[in-house]
Image: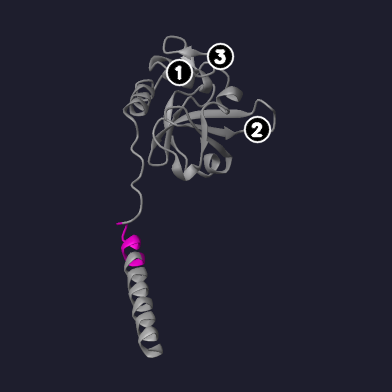
Amino acid sequence: MICIRIKRLYISLLQFSLLFICSMALSACGFLQPELEETPPAAKKVVSTAYSQIGKKYQPGGASPKKGFDCSGLIYWVYKENGYKVPRMTIDQARIGCRVSQEDAREGDILVFKTSQSPRGLHTGIYTGKHSFIHSPSTGKQVKEDTVDKPYWKQRLVSVRRVIQ
């Protein structure tokens, strides 16, 4: 009688082990992992609007294609054109929406960089995917696409903010 119980226990343990090993193998192949979240169409539209401003001049305090843009003015204008109210100032843009990890950044998210030690030493851009972002860099330059992989930007990226859920 005890032998039969031990045998059943052994078989159950073997079945569980086999099931566990198979599930681990399948999850490593991606079968049991959750799908990555799709970028909403509205976020893609924000990126498209930002692309349309590449080449516009940098203008301190600027927030329109006609006058030019500073970094926060570009973010403000692009989101406004798509029906979203985003603060005009960089310090406020650094707090808008939800914080997401850098690994989870998706198109349309706002990237926040710490570019100096002053309280106002922040810079923002719009993430376009594949480690790139659009921003209005500085005086004498134009709105452009850049890569977060450049050491200058990589060292200074402090936050990713998601406005469009």
Q: Which residue is drawn at the image coordinates 56% and 16% (left, top)?
A: 60
State which quadrant residue 22 falls in: bottom left
Look at the image and say whether residue 27 sits in the magenta stretch: yes
Q: Residue furthest front?
A: 1
* 1 or 3: mark nearer the eye: 3
Three-letter amino acid code at the position of disc 2: Ser
Q: Which residue is drawn at the image coordinates 33% and 56% (left, top)?
A: 32
Three-letter amino acid code at the position of disc 1: Lys
Mark 1 crowdedness (10 Å alpha carbons): few <14, some 14-19, many ≥20: many
Q: Which of the marked residues, 2 or 3, is nearer the chain's N terminus? A: 3
Q: Is residue 94 left or right of residue 131?
A: right
- Does the image show residue 35? yes
Marks 2 and 3, how far apart in space?
18 Å
Q: Is residue 60 above or below residue 40?
A: above
Marks 1 and 2, how far apart in space?
22 Å
Residue receiving disc 2: 116
Q: Which of the marked residues, 1 or 2, is nearer the chain's N terminus? A: 1
